[in-house]
Amino acid sequence: MNSRDLPAPARPRLLQPPPPPPRIPWLWVIVFAIGLGVGARWYVDRGQAASLDAAQVLIARGGLTDLHAAVDNFLNMSSRTPCIRTAEALVRAQAAAEYDDDREGARAAIGRAEPERALCSDLAIADGLLALADGDLDAAGAAVTAPTTSLSRPGRAWLQGTLALAGRGEQAAAIAEIEATIAAQPAAIAPRRALVWLYFEAGEFGGALQTLARARTAGLAHLGLAADEALLHALLRRELSGVADLADQLLALDPAALGPRDLAHAALARALVHVHGGEPAAGLGRAAAAWPSLAPWDAHARRLALELSLEAGDAERARELLAQLGVPEPEASIVRAWSLLAEGDVMASLVALSACPQDHPRVAYLQGLALVEQRRFPEAEPWLERADRMLPGRVEVEVARARVTVHTGDVATAQRKLEGIAAAEHYAPRAYTGLGEAYLSLGADSKDLRAAQRALTRAVEKEPRPAEAMLLLGEVWQRRRLKVPEAERNALAWYEQAAAAGLRLPRYREALARYLGDLGEGARAEAMLRELSQEPGIDPTTPLDLLALALARADAQGAAVPAEADEWLAAAVKLGADADALTRARARLNLARGTGLARSASDLEKLLRRKPYDIDARILAARVLVAQRDLEAAETLVRQGFYAAEPGRDEVATGRLFIAWGEIAIKQRKRKQAALHARAGFHRMLGEQRPTIELLAAVEFATDIFLRTEQHKIALGMTRQLTEALPFHGDAWRLHARALYDEGENPKSATRAVLKALELDPDNVRALELRAHVAARAGDRTTAREALARALELETREPDRQRMREFHRRHLGE
């Protein structure tokens, strides 16, 4: 068998012919490769598109963390993606301009995108945004006309609105562009933020609030919108409790989530609430810390910093900010007038405001508040009504109007209104002061006085300028002085604090001077009123009060009528004093001079025909008749007063009438009747809450008669009652010591009483003289000589000095 016979498979392999080469389907390979490439490209393009879509969503949402995430998306995309570096630069520039975030990073991104400038128009928008962040408004304005894409249109609309707010462009055009942008891209938040402030600047506060509410609905997680909400409500002085809560939450966040500018806005909003909550130092501190983060074009936030300084009473800081801000006229003049009001110079503020445009909302606002501070309530109401219409929702205007109602309308309605404001707005300015005024106006009921005291104490704690609340607290304690032992001292302390806190407003010192006069501290009161009489803006009654005190002092000292008496009367006339008050003042002056009595009698008679219930005029008319030696007519006139009730009242305040009747009875030599009238007058005057000086004079008049007629028990009863009513008044204890001394049964009690008088008033000349008498009777000549020597040092009236020297000669030796 040869090899050819073998089956082919059995043949040696080397001898087999080579198989034919395999046929590779190259066409299919090429088709597969192309398909694979297209698929990969499709997959990559699909991923790039998804990243771009996600980035656009993040940019529309517009929060700082959203913008950072959009930048990360762009960085992860292929560098071959068209305009990818421009998109990154645009987002970084938006963050730099809107949030003051990483300007250098934005600048570097624009540099990296420079090769794309010819093809990518959005880079011009990025340039404009970064220019705004740098404060170059001219360069920023050039970008407003640049073409946009869907990616850059919201940023350009925000830029145009922000520039319009800075005075670089028409606000109406900016509003139109933003509204068109929102219509095309409803999810875009940044343009809505600018639109809020454009409406605010145009005075459309309702539109601003509605736009912000819609934006908050569209961007629930946008922290910048939350900062806008806090700032807007702070500027409108609305819902300050809510502003405080929101600002505190924002300030507690990681700063990286909000950005320096919005953090500064939240801090400013919180600072305003500090000021309204009675913490001006904390408010000014927060505002000062926030100020460096406010861009020069951030007009509303910078304006709030200025207003906050004024409301905190830091007029000097406000003037510094005014100079930095370059506020145009007439706004600058209005701010200067506000600065005067912040310093408490209400009169100068009103003069300055009179030169400002009277139709300006802020002028109406400030004039209304200033007139309320001056207690010119009827004049204040029209201004406040206008301010409420042009600046709606301001809590301080609402409070001021309620305070006007307290004094000119339904007190109960005003009280309910103020209670509601105080409950709803923890930081409402002056709400507690107004509430205290309302409770005081309701009457002298102890429950109302306690409620007034609580409200006013809260006002002192919370208000940045609590002088008014201090003054009203003085009035509260003054009304309680005959029932609460420490009330007289507390009232004086509050009046003094009010005068110190309200130095620029005369009426606080006027109130202190009047109270000092009521206490019997005539010398101090007269000195204060003499100074006040030279100042502008004083009350028309101030010269008349000064005249009354000076005449009383001259009468007590046996001195001549003050030379300035006619000048004071003329000043009161010039200030517009009440005609009846002038009639009474002229009668006092004529009585002191002993001239013009017939004229005074005629004038007072006419007054009493119109106002038979005018007790002061009736007593003056009786004294004129006494001076004319017509005692019977004087007595008849006084007795008629017991039946002349004031309209709307059933009873007559008869205390002073009884005292006047007693004085006439003394002239008629009816000593017993005089004493009884004086005693009755004193008891009624206690119930009528008459001033301390009148109570002291009534008791001294009555006890002098009782002691002369040796009715010691009656005298002691009256003086004991006086010390219970006025336990911290030296003259009350002096009168009690005198009654004890004259009775002679309890020298130790007399000593204790006179020592108490000197403890309360060490330089009381009458008490020192009585101390000498008490000590001399007890055999303590050394103490008697020391007390009498001190009394002689202080006494200025020669007849009294002569009496003291005579006592020394007769009882203490030469």
Image: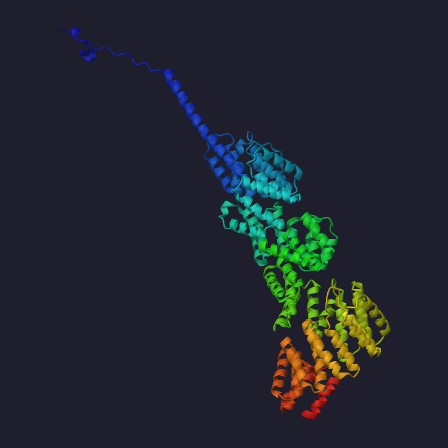
Quadrant holding the N terminus: top left
Q: Is 624 situated above or below 775?
A: above
Q: Is 1 situated above or below 155?
A: above
Q: Is 250 situated above or below 20?
A: below
- Looking at the picture, how far across and down is residue 248, in whole percent? 53, 51
- Looking at the picture, how far across and down is residue 229, in whole percent? 57, 46
Quadrant holding the C terminus: bottom right
- Looking at the picture, how far across and down is residue 203, in whole percent? 66, 44
Residue at screen point 62% across, 47% down: 300
Residue placed most toward the observer, 145 or 275: 275
Residue at screen point 60% across, 48% down: 233
Q: Is residue 104 left or right of residue 723?
A: left
Q: Is residue 77 left or right of residue 746?
A: left
Residue placed most toward the observer, 333 or 530: 530
Q: How is the image coloured?
A: rainbow
Residue placed most toward the observer, 332 or 192: 192
Q: Is residue 750 visible?
A: yes
Q: Is residue 567 visible?
A: no
Report the label total.
Answer: 0
Q: Quarter of the image holding residue 193? A: top right
Q: Quarter of the image holding residue 728? A: bottom right
- Looking at the picture, how far across and down is residue 532, in whole percent? 73, 67
